[in-house]
Image (spheres, helix red, strand yellow):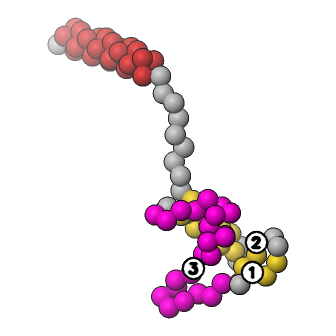
Amino acid sequence: MILDEDMRFLLKIRRKGILILPKKLREAVGFEEGDEVIVEVIGDSLVLRALKPKMVDVDLKLVEKLLREEDKFEEQRFRRMLQSGENNA
């Protein structure tokens, strides 16, 4: 049941705590079947937000370059550890 034009609904909590979100409400916030929803308690209110991981573009060549640099750094570090161990022995 819609109470006013500001997308305010009167909903009834059903058996076992089930709350049905009307289609108009789901569409207004972009909820789709199968979406995971984060529910937060803020004061005496519930806030629902769709959990939608952000997708980002990644430059694979840059990632590979950074991983190679990290690998070289770790190899140098390991060699220094071995050398210092040999010097202390």
- Residue 38 is covered by the magenta coloring: no
Which quarter of the rendering shows the C terminus? Answer: top left
Residue 67 in the image: state x and y as whole percent. 37, 20
Q: Residue at x 38, y 19 (%)?
A: 64
Residue 6 in the image: state x and y as whole percent. 81, 70
Q: Which mark is residue 7?
A: 2
Earlier along the polypeptide chain: callout 1 or callout 3? Answer: 1
Q: Can you see residue 31?
A: yes
Q: Which mark is residue 20?
A: 3
Q: Which residue is mark 1?
A: 2
Which quarter of the rendering shows the N terminus? Answer: bottom right
What separation in Å lies between label 2 and label 1 (alpha carbons)?
A: 7 Å
Label pair 2/1, CB-CB below 8 angstroms: yes
Q: Residue at x 49, y 61 (%)?
A: 35
Name the foreground residue: 43 vs 33. Answer: 33
Which three-letter amino acid code belongs to the residue tagged 3? Ile
- The reply, left or right, for residue 65 in relation to residue 31 is left
* View extreme (right): residue: 5
Q: Is residue 22 above or below residue 77?
A: below
Q: Quadrant location of residue 74? A: top left
Residue 18 in the image: state x and y as whole percent. 52, 83
